[in-house]
């Protein structure tokens, strides 16, 4: 069974921080890349950050979050974290993690076939 479970969402004021977690189990643990994405109601799902699951742990950040987000991976816990600081109201969205393949140098993704159910983030001004 493939399973990705996100947690850590919530409501915070602008300028605050959150750490989102994504625990992977089943086949998702064998993927080459784990990514965080976000989506607002009626909007497209967009990439936030990517990390490869090899020892090099290559990383990509969307320009909208670069400098405010840090993606890390704990291999022993099969968990990928997304630390978000300096949160803005426009960061409000449902955040999803997904597993598949990516090119961190460009942010290109493919084969992101496994998705979690998401965790809601609300930033108030």
Image (cartoon, grey):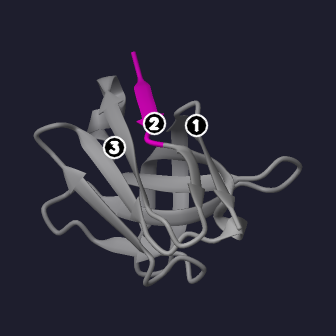
Disc 2 secondary structure class: strand
Q: Residues within 10 Å of mark 1 (few under 14, many from 20)?
A: many
Q: Is residue 85 magenta?
A: no
User: Residue 124 location, x and y as percent?
Assistant: 69, 60
- Residue 105 visible in the picture: yes
As rendered, which of 19 and 44 lies closer to the eye?
A: 19
Q: Earlier in the sequence, mark 3 or mark 1?
A: 3
As rendered, which of 41 and 125 lies closer to the eye?
A: 125
User: If the image is split into quadrants, where does the C terminus sit?
Assistant: bottom right
Residue 6 badge: 2
Residue 10 badge: none
Q: Residues within 10 Å of mark 2 (few under 14, many from 20)?
A: many
Q: Are marks 1 and 2 in contact (CB under 8 Å)?
A: yes
Query: Relative to 72, is 36 on the left or the right?
Result: right
Q: Which residue is mark 3?
A: 31
Real-space Cα distance between discs 3 and 1? 19 Å
Is 121 situated above or below 65?
A: above
Residue 118 badge: 1
Q: Which residues make up the magenta segment?
A: 1-8
Q: Residue at x 58, y 37 (%)?
A: 118
As rendered, which of 63 and 124 lies closer to the eye?
A: 124
Query: Relative to 121, is 4 on the left or the right?
Result: left
Q: Earlier in the sequence, mark 1 or mark 2?
A: 2
Q: Earlier in the sequence, mark 2 or mark 3?
A: 2
């Amino acid at each position: 069974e493939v399973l990705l479970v996100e947690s850590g969402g919530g409501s915070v004021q602008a300028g605050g921080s959150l750490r989102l977690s994504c625990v992977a189990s089943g086949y998702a643990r064998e993927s080459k890349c784990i990514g965080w994405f976000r989506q607002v109601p009626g909007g497209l799902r967009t990439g936030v950050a990517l990390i490869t699951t090899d020892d090099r742990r290559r990383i990509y950040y969307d320009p909208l979050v670069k400098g405010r987000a840090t993606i890390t991976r704990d291999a022993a816990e099969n968990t990928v974290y997304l630390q978000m600081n300096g949160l803005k109201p426009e960061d409000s969205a449902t955040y999803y993690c997904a597993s598949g393949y990516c090119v961190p140098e460009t942010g290109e993704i493919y084969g992101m076939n496994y998705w979690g159910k998401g965790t809601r983030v609300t930033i108030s001004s």
